[in-house]
Structures are given as structure tokens and as C-alpha cells.
Amino acid sequence: MSRELYLSLTAVLGLASCATAQQEIPPTDDAQPPADAAAIDDGPPSVSGTRSANTLSWEDLSVRLVGLQTSQGLQIDVTTLDDDAIALAAEDIHAHLADLKQRIPAAHDLFPDDIEEMTPLLVAFTGFEKEITFDPSRLIIFSEGSTFYPLHVLPVSPNFDRRLVGLYETVYGIYLFEPGIDFFANLEFQYADLTSGAAWLSLVRRVQRAKARREVESQG
């Protein structure tokens, strides 16, 4: 993607974000929206019961971006929404992530592209200062010589479009990248000086091991 096209894309995203401020992804038809939108629980669910050794935790499905400049005060975590991966998660986590993913088609009214074919990821921005701003469009993916920019960013948290997080506050958004990004490739996420490094490959290995254990369990 050329720099000119990227700048044009980020400008469009910025206009769309302003035009749709405070609009989260609409709930599915069978979900009842809460009376207080600010009370939406968009973070990791509390896993009930005993988790099987063959299931994955929220941390197993996520990578964290780290950097040398700790003064930046921003923590970014990326959680996969790949169907095969979240199918291996603990029951509560699977239900939560699957529900988020099912809401994506409702964004057709905002972005009429064929978004079901795009590569979705759940991204969390956490603040470690009194107030810290973030720019959603600056999160990119490097993979085997290619660079991928977000095509759309869909707010999940009610306050996501403020682009501001307070101390220990976390907001979530669903990122849609172009279709066909290889889940098993070495994906490196970068935001300013923050990077996930090779953490994605460890995530892939965890998914592969959990899948193999579950297959052995089902055959036994």
C-alpha cells in the first residue's frame, strides 16, 4: 500500500470515527442491550468452573506489545478472533469472543465492504497514566515482508472513540485487516515504538498444542 493511499485511508477512518462517536457495534438481535451503555462489560470474562487443560485462556489467545520507552504509558494487547483458535478457549471466553465476532456484520451499515471476509482482531488499549491518548490507525502488522494496515476499526467500548484512556482504564475495538492474512505466519504487530516481536508464533504454538490435545482426547 502506498503512503498516499494509507494517508487517505486514515483520513477516512478519522472522519468515520467522528461521525459515529459513541456508537458501539450493535448487539445481535437476540442480545438485550444494557440500560446503561457505559456499563458494557467488554473485557475478559471471569471463567467459571474448572478450566480443562485442553482449553485456552484469554492470555493464551493474546499477544502484548512492548517497547523500550516505558514512559509512553500505553499498553496494547491483541487477541485473535480466528474461529479455530477461539473454539479451543474456555467456555466463557469462547462465548464472549464469539459474541463479539457475531456483531461484526451489523457494521455493514457503516462500512458496506464485504467485512465478513476480512481478518478480525480484538485490540485493547490500557492507560498507565492519568490520561493518555492513542491513535487507532497507527497499529499495523508486519508479516514476511508485507505490511498490513487496518481497513476498519469498529468500537466495542462505549468510550473508544474518545481515543483517550485514564489510569488503569481499558477500551476495546475490533480491527478488520484485509482477507487472507495467514494465521500461522509470523505476524508482528507494531504501534509507534511498541512491538509484539515474535510473540505471535508462541500464540500459534499454543493453539496447535491445544488442538492436538483435544483431538487425542476425542479419540480416546
Image (cartoon, helix red, strand yellow):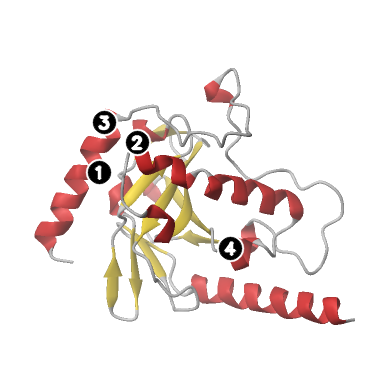
Viewer-nearest of discs 2 and 1: 1
Q: Quadrant of the C terminus?
A: bottom right
Residue 218 as seen in the image, left or right of residue 42: right
Label whose residue precedes the other's in the sequence (3 or 4): 3
- Secondary structure at badge 2 equals loop
Residue 216 as seen in the image, left or right of residue 6: right
- Secondary structure at badge 3 equals helix
Instruction: Determine which residue is flagged by label 1.
Output: 13
Q: Residue furthest right?
A: 220
- Secondary structure at badge 4 equals helix
Residue 208 as seen in the image, left or right of residue 10: right
Q: On residue 163, which mark appears?
A: 2
Q: Position of residue 92 (x, y in %)?
A: 73, 48
Q: How far apart are the two marked residues, 2 and 4, measured between alpha carbons?
A: 28 Å
Foreground: 39 or 33?
A: 33
Label pair 2/1, CB-CB below 8 angstroms: no
Label pair 3/4, CB-CB below 8 angstroms: no
Instruction: Determine which residue is flagged by label 4.
Output: 83
Q: How far apart are the two marked residues, 1 and 4, measured between alpha carbons?
A: 26 Å
